[in-house]
Structure formats: C-alpha cells, structure tokens
Image (cartoon, grey):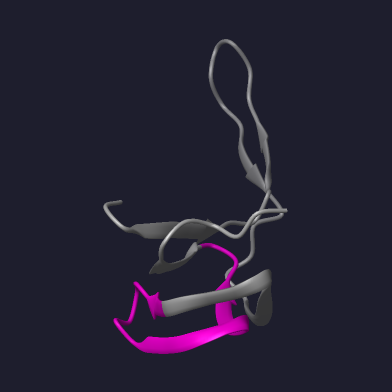
Amino acid sequence: KGDRTLVFVLQNAVVTGSAVGGGGVEGLVNQKTKIDVCFREPVQDVVDERTGKNLGNGRRFTFDFNSVEAVFFSFQGVPPRR
C-alpha cells in the first residue's frame, strides 16, 4: 500500500462443507503463542498494525499469535528478494 508492504500471518485451518452447506473450521482453538517472523534481509520501519507499535528495523520480529486472528504488520518498501 503506497510505499509500505502489508503482511498477514494466518493459521492454515481445515475448512469442511458441502454443496448444500454445513461444515466449518476444524481444530481452530483460541490460543496464544509466540511466533518469530524472519526476513532474508533487514526490513525498515516495521509497525504492528494491530497495536500501532513501532518495532523498528531488523531481520527478526516476535509477535503474539492468537490462532483465531491474523498477525498484521507492515514495513517500509518492498519485500526482500529471495
């Protein structure tokens, strides 16, 4: 968005259902854990978009991950290349 990259981290939960409806998400539990997001190259001006907290610059960032929500953060510029 503009000159910032937006990042969402989600749990890949199994969703069931059929053509006539029913189903839902299996195994989704409201549980918090810590996750580390690591970049190949340093990124600049990282902001936790949920809290508004500026996390600074670096290659590794730790977030509280509630498995029923997304971790949502942004950083300045484009994603580092592979």
Q: Quadrant of residue 58?
A: bottom right
- As displayed, is residue 75 above or below residue 57? above
Image coordinates of residue 37 in percent, x first then y, are 65, 73
Q: Is residue 4 magenta?
A: no
Q: What residue is shown at x 67% (from left), y 78% (from top)?
A: 35
Q: Is residue 62 magenta?
A: yes
Image coordinates of residue 2 in percent, x first then y, are 26, 52
Image coordinates of residue 54 in percent, x first then y, are 36, 87
Q: What residue is shown at x 29% (from left), y 81% (from top)?
A: 52
Q: Quadrant of residue 23?
A: top right
- As displayed, is residue 57 above or below residue 31? below
Q: Specify whether 72 is left or right of 17.
A: left
**Magenta stretch: dominant SS?**
strand
**49 or 10: which is nearer to us?**
49
**54 or 3: which is nearer to us?**
3
Residue stretch in magenta? 46-68
